[in-house]
Structures are given as C-alpha cells and as structure tokens.
Image: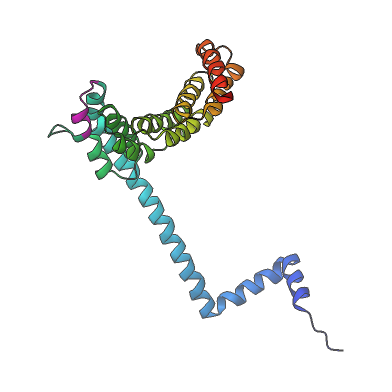
Amino acid sequence: MANTKTKKEEGIEILEDPDVLAGKAEEFFNNSKNRNLVFGIGGVIAIAILAFLGYKYFITGKNTEAQKEMFQAVHYFEADSLGKALNGDGINYGFLDIIDNYGGTDAANLANFYAGTSFLKMGNAESAISYLESFSSSDYLVQARAYALVGDANMELGDYSAAASSYDQAASHKPNKEYTPLYLQKLAIANEANGKFSAAAAAYAKIVEEYPNSSLVQEAKKHKARLQGLAAE
C-alpha cells in the first residue's frame, strides 16, 4: 500500500517538527507569487502603522498648540466674559475657534464642555445641549456634570422628560456621596414637573436611603412624603 499522508497527518507533522515547518516556510517563500503576496501585505501593514503613529504624533502636537491657544478663552470664561470666551477677542481664539481648528484633540473636546456651559449661562439652551453632548470625559465627576448640565438645559426648554433622562444619567454615572444626591434631587424635580410623582418620590427616597449623611436628606424626606401623598390621590 502506498505510503501516503492525510492532510491532518501533514499538519500535525508540521506543528511537531520545527525542521519540517522551516522547510515548508522556505518552500512557500520560494514561490514568487507567495513572496510578493507576503511583502505586499507586510507593506500595507507597515504603511498603516506609520500612518497611525504619524496621526498620533500630529494630534499630540496639535493638542499642545490648542491648549496654548485656549488659555485666554478659559480666562474670559472664568471672568464671566462669555462672548469673548466663545468667539475670541480678535487676537486670541475663543472656544468655538478651538473646536473648528483643532478637531480631534483633547483641547477641542474640553472646549465643547466650556462652550456648552457658556451657552447655557447665556440662555441659549439648544446650543448648550449640542456642545455638551459632543463632550466626553474619562473623569467621572466631569462627565456626570456634563450630563447634569444637559438636564439643566432641557429644563430651560421645558422638556422635563429629556431633563429627567439626563439627570438620571448624571446620578447613575459612578455614584458618589459628594454630587450624586444633588443629581437625584434634580431628577426628582424634573419628574415632578413632568407629573411623575412616584418617580420623583423614589429619587428622594434614594437620597434618604443611600446618602444618609447628605445635607439634602431632611429636605428629601419632606418632599418624599409630599410626593407620595400626591401619587396616592
């Protein structure tokens, strides 16, 4: 009977014997079509890696530049000169310029937060929502704050359902004793404004039960009892 090997047996031999594996590799590369294929794929991968590294270097450099350009806008924001903070002063960039000219950088991302907050302070709730929703942060306190500000903007627009949703996001985002009770209070107020008395009472109950040392507990107890009465009517 002929001494033939199945595909499975050949595969096992290649895996178990380094010399066989080396021979197979040499045979593969000796084929010009295979060699061109490998080098072609390798070239594409190398170009992709270089492009990624180049982009990362470019963005890092742009971010450093953007941070310097944004310094004066932050100063105007802290001084409550919100028009200049947003649009610049004719010499220095405002937050909107940073967003437009340095997209993709951390500085532009932060500028979205500042711009959204500025618009909210100026009474432009719709623009505030647009910029705040474009912002994201790995800092749990800042991200929760952004959600809460979106809630504040929706309250100004009279969209109590959307406001409650945003406050719920803020309260649920990595809860903590410092700020979560405040977001729960805002959630309760939005739900009450929307006629959802049971949901409002539940938010106050959460303050009482989960944050007993909060300065908002006594007020939460009072409103919880009131809202439970309204829900029962």
User: Is residue 41 at least partly visible in the picture?
Assistant: yes
The quarter of the picture where the N terminus appears is bottom right
Name the side, left or right, on which 190 lies relative to 117. right
Q: What predominant SS class does the magenta segment belong to? A: helix
Q: Quadrant of residue 131?
A: top left
Q: Position of residue 56 (x, y in %)?
A: 38, 47
- Assess whether residue 144 is covered by the magenta stretch: no
Q: Nearer the viewer, residue 196 or 111?
A: 196
Name the side, left or right, on which 172 lies relative to 76. right
Q: Position of residue 53 (x, y in %)?
A: 40, 51
The quarter of the picture where the C terminus appears is top right
81 relative to 220, above or below? below
Which stretch did the figure color magenta? 79-86
Q: Farthest residue in the left direction?
A: 90
Q: Nearer the viewer, residue 144 or 28?
A: 144
Q: Nearer the viewer, residue 106 or 23?
A: 106
Q: Residue at x 41, y 31 (%)?
A: 151
209 relative to 108, above or below? above
Q: Position of residue 102 (x, y in %)?
A: 28, 43
